[in-house]
Image (cartoon, rainbow, N blue to C red):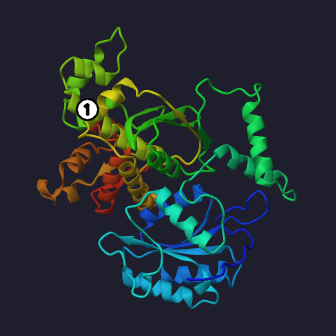
């Protein structure tokens, strides 16, 4: 779209300045689909770009005027989704190139495989076909900027070193007037890694960081795309979760210290492999070898190898969605040579597995539903009352089995957490049902009287 790139200006509001005082490359990203936009945005930011998100034509025009060549010159490229609504994307592109300097910005289109050239007249723009990986997207963005002389370095791979990222952040924060070159930062990082006085765990994690500085979905997507084997651990005070990763798949998940029931037994019952009373009777018996529950059930003949693989996948899906809701804490990734024995057993059932990308989509849908419920989302300690006169007007077939099971336990005494424990469905699933029933005037939250 251009022969000359805009000069770099002040750091954009959605990004941070680099340690040498220059602005990170800014990308104006138009995508009406918030879920897919979130994934792509996280990957771009982790790769070192500042991203300005626009979900409508008006937002795209406003951002381009403010941060494009006619504004503070933070935006150096345009990234437009043309797969969802090609006509609207064409209108956005037309509006952006009419802004002073907009036609000089390099552009990239996100397209579908069924329609690789959705915008007439824009066939010469570089494209990325959905579904795409973060490395593929970043590679095309790098190449588009390199064609304009706006960036340097290899374009085909992402190299992320969170230690260097954190060093840059702290140097910028504590020495705002001082400039440090990339070589100086690299030498500082190497010196710290080689310092024997710094206490490091025996199995040294290759990636570590804080959830406030990096989004967990971006880290998980990067690890999934790389296909590495290891354990991603997320910690927040006395609670933690672990995801065992291998070849772009989540093989096993563990969690401890959360109010949500995410133990394996819940998914044994929820999947219909055993009744609740059967499982409870089995758990009562102590195991002198202290084997994991899944291994015990398998060896006792209650479930098959294929059943165990399905249960492990269901648990991993729920644990991943739960961890994505954490806003504080730290994460570490430690490569491993071998899989956990239960993860290895589940991996043998190739027909039953959980891709990292699939788990991310489930988790992001969970986050979207949480946003929709907003302040009306039931808390785990909330207690609800059933409005029997309204329920009586419905036929028994009007409600699906899972909603009926929840409704029958709404009695003014059971909390959301207790209903989740009794139904073995999880607090989020119960909260979602109660939110819908409250909107349909079938239940209402119990309000304790205030003494005066």
| Of 25 and 319, the residue lying toward us | 25
Q: Is residue 384 above or below residue 273?
A: below
Q: Residue at x 75, y 71 (%)?
A: 10
Q: Position of residue 211 (x, y in %)?
A: 59, 47
Q: Position of residue 338 (x, y in %)?
A: 43, 27
Q: Quadrant of residue 272?
A: top left
Q: Is residue 121 above or below residue 8?
A: below
Position of residue 64 in the picture relative to residue 444 (left or right): right
- Position of the N terminus by quadrant: bottom right
Residue 281 visible, this orientation: no
Q: Residue at x 37, y 39 (%)?
A: 316
Q: Is residue 52 above or below residue 352?
A: below
Q: Residue at x 72, y 73 (%)?
A: 8
Residue 232 visible, this orientation: yes
Q: Position of residue 60 (x, y in %)?
A: 54, 80
Q: Is residue 278 above or below residue 178?
A: above
Q: For mark 1, what is the residue?
A: 268
Q: Position of residue 142 (x, y in %)?
A: 57, 65
| Of 274 and 244, the residue lying toward us | 244
Q: Secondary structure at mark 1?
A: helix
| Of 262 and 349, the residue lying toward us | 349
Q: Residue at x 37, y 14 (%)?
A: 290
Q: Quadrant of residue 7?
A: bottom right
Q: Residues within 10 Å of mark 1 (few under 14, many from 20)?
A: many
């Amino acid at each position: 779209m251009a022969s000359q790139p805009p000069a770099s200006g002040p750091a954009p509001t959605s990004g941070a300045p680099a340690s040498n005082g220059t602005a990170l490359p800014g990308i104006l990203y138009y995508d009406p689909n918030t879920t897919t936009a979130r994934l792509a945005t996280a990957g771009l930011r982790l790769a070192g770009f500042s991203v300005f998100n626009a979900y409508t034509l008006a937002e795209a025009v406003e951002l381009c005027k403010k941060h494009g060549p006619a504004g503070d010159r933070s935006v150096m490229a345009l990234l437009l989704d043309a797969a969802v609504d090609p006509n609207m994307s064409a209108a956005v592109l037309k509006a952006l190139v009419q802004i002073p300097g907009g036609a000089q910005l390099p552009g990239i289109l996100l397209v579908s495989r069924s329609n690789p050239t959705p915008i007439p007249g824009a066939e010469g723009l570089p494209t990325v076909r959905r579904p795409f990986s973060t490395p593929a997207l970043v590679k095309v963005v790098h190449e588009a900027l390199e064609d304009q002389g706006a960036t340097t370095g290899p374009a085909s791979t992402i190299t992320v070193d969170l230690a260097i990222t954190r060093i840059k952040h702290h140097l910028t924060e504590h020495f705002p007037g001082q400039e440090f070159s990339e070589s100086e930062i690299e030498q500082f990082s190497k010196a710290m890694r080689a310092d024997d006085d710094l206490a490091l765990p025996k199995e040294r994690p290759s990636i570590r960081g804080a959830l406030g500085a990096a989004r967990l979905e971006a880290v998980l997507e990067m690890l999934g795309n790389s296909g590495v084997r290891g354990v991603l651990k997320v910690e927040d005070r006395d609670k933690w979760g672990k995801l065992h990763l291998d070849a772009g798949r989540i093989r096993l998940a563990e969690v401890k210290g959360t109010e949500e029931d995410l133990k394996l037994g819940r998914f044994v019952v929820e999947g219909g492999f055993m009744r609740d009373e059967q499982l409870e009777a089995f758990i009562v018996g102590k195991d002198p070898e202290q084997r994991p529950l899944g291994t015990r059930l398998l060896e006792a003949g209650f479930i098959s190898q294929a059943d165990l693989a399905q249960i492990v996948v269901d648990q991993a899906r729920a644990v991943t969605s739960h961890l994505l809701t954490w806003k504080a804490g730290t994460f570490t990734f430690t490569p491993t040579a071998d899989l956990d024995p239960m993860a290895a057993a589940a991996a043998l059932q190739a027909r039953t597995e959980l891709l990292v990308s699939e788990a991310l989509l489930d988790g992001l849908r969970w986050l979207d539903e949480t946003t929709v419920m907003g302040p009306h989302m039931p808390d785990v300690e909330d207690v609800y009352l059933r409005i029997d006169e309204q329920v009586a007007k419905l036929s028994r077939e009007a409600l699906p089995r899972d909603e009926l099971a929840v409704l029958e336990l709404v009695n003014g005494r059971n909390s959301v957490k207790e209903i989740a424990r009794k139904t073995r469905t999880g607090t989020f699933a119960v909260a979602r049902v109660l939110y819908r029933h409250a909107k349909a005037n079938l239940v209402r939250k119990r309000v304790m009287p205030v003494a005066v």
